[in-house]
Image: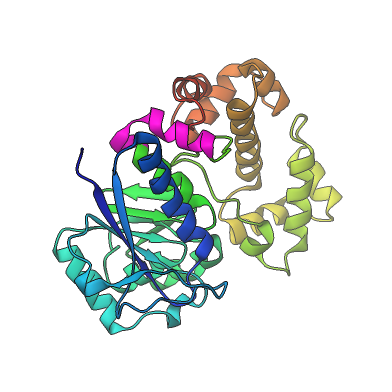
C-alpha cells in the first residue's frame, strides 16, 4: 500500500460548502477506484469545533488544527465575508505550517487569508471573480489570476464553486496518473477535466459596472456575431458611439482594445468547439470568424500557449482533459 497524501482543510466561518465538497469528493473517489488509501483528509478548525458554512451546515468530525498531526497539504476554505473570517491566530497557524514545509492551498476566497498572512507574495493564485478587483489593489505583491485554478510551485488555489473539482483532478492526474483522474470524472458525469488555461467566466457587468451599458451592448453584439465579425466602426455606430470613444471605454474599463476583446471572445468559443465537438479545425476557423487557418493558429497559440491541433491532440490522448 502506498503512503497516503495527508490533506487538511481549514474551514473558516461562512466557508463555501460547494467548494469544500468538490475538493474532497475526488479524493474519496480516487481511494475507492484504486482500492487503496491514496489520500487521507481532515476537516480542521483552530479549536476543533465544527464550523458553520455559508449554507448553515457544518462538517463532523472536525479536528483541532494543532493536533491534526503531520500534513502534506493544507487548504484554507473561504467563502462569504472572508475579511471577517480569520484572526491573528489563524494567520500564525498558517505561517507555522509554511515554515514546516506544508504545501499550502486555498478554495474560493481562502486565497485572501493566505495573502493576508504574507504567504502568496510572488505567487500566482486564483480567487473567486467577485473578489479579484479588490484583492489586486490590496495585495500588489500577489499575482491574482482569473483562471479557474492555479498551481504555482507549492501553492494550489481554486477560484470556488466547482473549480476545486478540476484542481483536485489535475492533482490526482499528476500524482497518480491521468487514467485514474479520467475514471473519476466519468464517475462524476463530468464532461471534461478543465485545465490550468481555463478561465473563470466573469460576467461583463461585474467587470465594468452597471453604468457602462454601452460596453455591455457592444460586447453583446460581438457575442452574436462570431462567425461573421462586425467591424468596430459598425459596432460603435450601433451602440451610438464613435469608434474612438468605444476604444477609450474598453481600454479604461477592460484594459484592452475592443478588437482584442473581440478576438479573445472568438478564440474562447473556438476552444470550446475544439474540446467539445468533432468539428474540423478548418470548420472552427471559419465558424469563429478567422479568414485563414494560419492566422487562427497563430492567434490561438498566442492566447492559449499551444496550437489548435496540439490542444485537440492532448484532449484525445487524455480523454476529458483540457
The residue positioned farthest toward the left in the image shown: 100
Q: Nearer the viewer, residue 56 or 322?
A: 56
Tell me: 235 left or right of 51.
Answer: right
- Across the whole image, how many numbered discs are drawn on residues? 0
Position of 279 relative to 194 (above/below): above
* Quadrant housing residue 172: top left
Magenta: predominant secondary structure element?
helix
Residue at screen point 54% across, 57% down: 161
Report if residue 159 is visible in the image.
Answer: no
Q: Position of residue 23 (x, y in %)?
A: 43, 53
Residue 18 seen in render? yes
Is residue 176 found inside the magenta-colored segment of the image? yes
Residue 282 higher or lower than 86, as above or below:
above
Point out residue 8 in the picture as x, y percentages from the top left corner. 30, 61
Q: Position of residue 100 (x, y in %)?
A: 14, 63
Is 99 on the left or on the right of 308, as rendered?
left
User: Is 97 located above or below residue 320 in the figure?
Assistant: below
The magenta-colored residue range is 173-187
In the visual, does 68 lie left or right of 177? left
* 52 or 175: nearer the viewer: 52
Residue in the picture at 42% in, 35% down: 181
Residue 260 lies in magenta, yes or no? no
Q: Quadrant of residue 254?
A: bottom right
Amino acid at each position: 500500500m502506498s503512503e497516503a497524501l495527508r490533506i487538511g482543510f481549514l474551514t473558516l466561518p461562512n466557508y463555501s460548502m460547494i467548494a469544500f465538497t468538490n475538493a474532497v469528493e475526488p479524493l474519496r473517489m480516487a481511494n475507492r477506484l484504486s482500492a487503496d488509501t491514496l489520500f487521507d483528509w481532515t476537516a480542521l478548525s483552530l479549536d476543533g469545533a465544527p464550523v458553520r458554512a455559508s449554507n448553515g451546515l457544518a462538517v463532523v468530525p472536525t479536528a483541532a488544527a494543532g493536533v491534526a498531526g503531520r500534513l502534506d497539504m493544507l487548504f484554507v476554505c473561504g467563502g462569504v465575508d472572508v475579511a471577517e473570517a480569520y484572526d491573528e491566530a489563524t494567520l500564525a497557524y498558517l505561517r507555522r505550517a509554511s515554515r514546516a514545509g506544508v504545501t499550502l492551498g486555498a478554495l474560493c476566497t481562502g486565497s485572501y487569508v493566505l495573502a493576508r498572512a504574507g504567504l502568496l507574495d510572488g505567487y500566482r493564485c486564483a480567487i473567486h471573480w467577485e473578489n479579484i478587483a479588490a484583492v489586486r489593489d490590496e495585495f500588489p505583491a500577489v499575482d491574482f489570476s482569473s483562471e479557474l485554478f492555479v498551481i504555482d510551485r507549492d501553492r494550489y488555489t481554486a477560484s470556488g464553486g466547482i473549480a476545486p473539482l478540476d484542481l483536485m483532478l489535475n492533482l490526482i492526474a499528476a500524482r497518480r496518473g491521468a487514467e485514474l483522474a479520467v475514471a473519476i470524472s466519468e464517475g462524476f458525469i463530468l464532461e471534461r477535466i478543465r485545465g490550468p488555461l481555463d478561465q473563470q467566466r466573469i460576467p461583463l457587468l461585474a467587470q465594468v459596472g452597471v453604468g457602462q451599458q454601452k460596453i455591455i451592448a457592444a460586447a453583446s453584439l460581438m457575442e452574436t456575431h462570431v462567425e461573421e465579425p462586425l467591424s468596430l466602426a459598425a459596432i460603435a455606430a450601433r451602440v451610438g458611439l464613435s469608434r474612438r470613444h468605444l476604444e477609450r471605454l474598453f481600454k479604461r474599463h477592460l484594459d484592452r482594445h475592443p478588437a482584442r476583446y473581440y478576438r479573445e471572445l472568438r478564440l474562447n468559443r473556438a476552444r470550446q468547439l475544439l474540446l467539445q465537438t468533432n468539428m474540423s479545425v478548418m470548420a472552427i476557423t471559419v465558424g469563429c470568424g478567422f479568414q485563414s487557418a494560419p492566422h487562427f493558429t497563430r492567434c490561438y497559440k498566442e492566447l492559449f500557449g499551444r496550437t489548435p491541433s496540439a490542444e485537440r491532440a492532448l484532449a484525445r490522448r487524455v480523454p476529458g482533459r483540457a
